[in-house]
Amino acid sequence: MASFSNFFLLLALISSSLSISHSLTCSSQSFPDRTFTNCQDLPYLNAFLHWSYNPRNSSLSIAFLAPPPTTAGWVAWAVNPTATGMAGSQAFLAAFFAKSLTVRTFNITSYNSVRPSPTLSFPFWDLASESSDDLFAIFVTVKVPEKASSLNQVWQVGPSVDSSTGVPAAHEFKSDNLKSRGVLVFEGSAGAPSPAPRPDHGGASTATSPSVVGGVNEAAAAPTPKASGPDKGGVPGIKRRNLGCVVLSWFVFAVWGIFSF
């Protein structure tokens, strides 16, 4: 009987340790060669946002992380300069294009019109993507209006991307998908530890990865330089946390084996 009690205790402890790996917060995440002064656990789609505001050149550097609904899925983060929804937003989408995780940009003029666009209505630079465990990460620095204190953000995830055309499949229309928007207030945030490169004057974007998605139904893909591929450092904070859960589970198993006989 004692052995059965210990066995159920073991299951409870393992379940608890596994639940920890699925309840990560932004404060547990870190990035090689990147530092952000603020982070937020976004309320929907298990997403996270890290950011630093640099008042010296009115720029906002962000890292957006979210788990795609499938291994072939996509994640996207967008800025809407004029409204709070997806329509009218300027989006950055990460997905595996030609077996390489890549970010592309899209101008979403309406819910029925999603256009690939190598330039957006605001300058952006330092565009990159990474993957780690079950998360995709998007990195980008965007130019914000001088003396601005906030921006409208939208984020989304989708199930797949067409392997031949690069067109992302439509996201689901569940409650979390429809609520994944908000206002990011960055006024008063500490400045970035090192200033982001200032974009070229006169152009909309100096990013090296053109063309993306925002999370609506249709899009046409354009050739894009590849961003960072998978399994190249990713998000080590997450990797360490998951590894710790596995080690803890095996430790509990070993202790149970010793004292249950």
Image: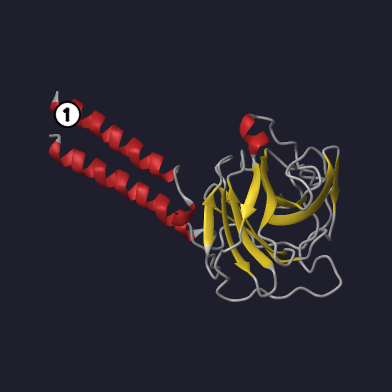
Q: In which quarter of the image is the C terminus?
A: top left
Q: Where is residue 81 in the image (x, y as percent from the top left)?
A: 77, 53
Q: Residue at x 20, y 26 (%)?
A: 4
Name the residue carrying label 1: 3
Side (left or right) of 152 relative to 52: right
Q: Where is residue 53 in the image (x, y as percent from the top left)?
A: 62, 66
Q: Which residue is drawn at 70% across and 56% down?
A: 102
Of residue 229 and residue 117, the one placed in the foreground of this image is 117
Residue 104 in view, yes or no: yes
Of residue 23 and residue 158, the one placed in the foreground of this image is 23
Q: In which quarter of the image is the N terminus?
A: top left
**Dividing the picture into quarters, in which one does residue 10 lie?**
top left
Neighbourhood count class around disc 1 (C-alpha, 10 Å): few under 14, some 14–19, many 20 upward? few
127 is higher (above) or lower (below) than 106: below
162 is higher (above) or lower (below) than 136: above
Q: Position of residue 159 (x, y in %)?
A: 68, 38
19 is higher (above) or lower (below) than 209: above
Q: What residue type is labelled 1?
A: Ser
Q: Which residue is drawn at 82% across and 40% down?
A: 218
Residue 72 in view, yes or no: no
Side (left or right) of 68 relative to 127: left
